[in-house]
Structures are given as structure tokens and as C-alpha cells.
Image (cartoon, rainbow, N blue to C red):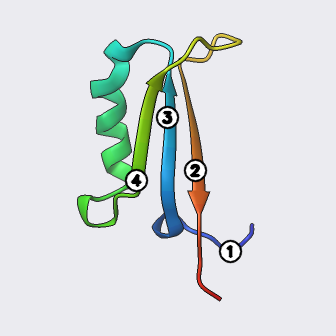
Amino acid sequence: SAGYSLNDVVRVTVYLDDTRDFAGFNKVYAQYFSAEHAPARVCVQARMMSDLRVEVDCIAYKKD
């Protein structure tokens, strides 16, 4: 709604409840971000506060 797209994403932080899910997450991630437009990424294991298995936080940027 703010006029941004996945091509504007410059950083992604991924929180996984179980690091064994990393390979599966990577397959899904590759469907959204190509190798040519891959943003910087951090992936950490995190104890979730609910029944979530993964949480993704993105930062997007556009020049004026």
C-alpha cells in the first residue's frame, strides 16, 4: 500500500523456531528473491512467543 515491491527490499531478518527448517525456508525464500536481487539477510534461531515457526522482518528503500 506504500508503493514498495519486493525489488525494493534491502534487508531481511528471519527468525526460525527450529534451525532444521532453514533448508525449507530457503526454498520458499528463493521463490520471492532471485540471486540477482537478493537483499542482505540475517537468519537466527528464536524462541517464538506463540505457535509460529518463522517470522520475517523486511526493510525496503526507494530513492526519491
User: Outermost residue toward the right?
Assistant: 1
- Between the C-alphas of marks 3 and 2, the distance is 9 Å
Earlier residue among tags 3 and 2: 3
Position in image of residue 46 (x %, y %)? 54, 17
Q: Which residue is mark 2?
A: 58
Q: Around disc 3, counting alpha carbons within 10 Å, would you say few (fewer than 14), some (14 to 19), or many (20 or more)?
A: some
Q: In the rendered structure, are the residues bearing label 3 and label 2 in contact, judged by CB atoms less than 8 Å apart? A: no
Amino acid type at circle 3 is: Val
SS at mark 4?
Answer: strand
53, above or below 63, in the image: above
Q: Which residue is mark 3?
A: 14
Earlier residue among tags 1 and 4: 1
The quarter of the picture where residue 37 lies is bottom left
Q: Which residue is mark 1?
A: 3
Mark seen at residue 40:
4
Position in image of residue 4 (x %, y %)? 62, 70
